[in-house]
Amino acid sequence: STQSRSSAASDVYKRQVYYGTTLVDDRSNMTRIETRQSLIQVGTDVIGSHGFNPTGLNTVLKTAGVPKGSFYYYFASKEELIQAVVEYRDDKFYNWLASRLEQVKPGYDGLNELFDAVDDWMHNRVDVLTDFHGCFFINTCAEYNDPNHPVYLQCQQHKTRVNSLIERQIRALGISELAIQYVTESISLLKEGAIVCLLYTSDAADDLLCVD
């Protein structure tokens, strides 16, 4: 019947879902998801450039074009936004680096590609990443330095994920298990050192990246 078809259309186009205590239309939900993602992306750019504590929530909202009063419609707290930003940056960086390493043979080629990739990132030659302002996760740990804080633990997990990519290259060299752990940690330290060095002297960073 006409009434049944009308009811079905209403179900399809105006299906409603709950978010907390607010009942919203699916079409509004799409806007909500997109706006939330925009806040995460803008937060990554702004916070990555200036740090978490110096960056006020109002700065992120203004840059994203989101009214101040509507923030809690998208996030329960600033802390939730920060954790979402760290997760977003983690996935972005890890997926980019993993993609670079997948293009070459694991082992020596992979290690060379690792440092070529880091060099490209440090000199702003990677379109999918924001401009280099040091390591996002090192900088974040400096602000959230409680080892039990959720944000600190997220940063720690990021480093573990990146180290797994390095370990894959080391394992391809066919060395002992003990040596794999030692060399992985050494390469990771070399990479981190180059990142930190670039903040005060590019020559030192460039020297560290010369691993051929």
Image (cartoon, rainbow, N blue to C red):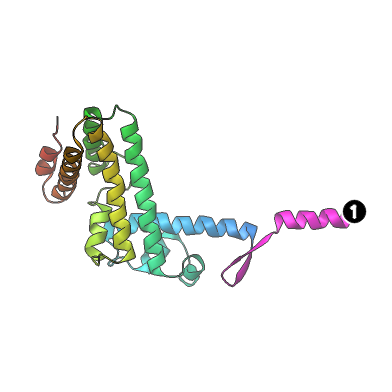
Kindly identify the amino acid type of the residue bearing the numbered disc 1: Ser
Image location of residue 1, percent across then percent down: 90, 53
| Residue at x-position 47% and y-position 64% | 66
Number of numbered discs: 1
Q: Is residue 8 magenta?
A: yes
Relative to 52, is 183 on the left or the right? left
Q: Does the magenta stretch include residue 200?
A: no
Establish if 53 lies above or below 44.
below
Relative to 69, is 99 on the left or the right? left
Relative to 84, is 7 on the left or the right? right
| Residue at x-position 17% and y-position 40% | 178
**Frontmost residue, 41 versus 185:** 185
Q: Quadrant of residue 77?
A: bottom left
Q: What stretch is highlighted in magenta?
A: 1-24
- Circle 1: is it few (<14), some (14-19), or many (20+) Cα within 10 Å? few
Establish if 102 lies above or below 39.
above
Image location of residue 146, percent across then percent down: 25, 67
Q: In which quarter of the image is residue 203?
A: top left
User: What SS does tag 1 mark?
Assistant: loop
Residue picked out by circle 1: 1
| Residue at x-position 71% and y-position 55% | 13
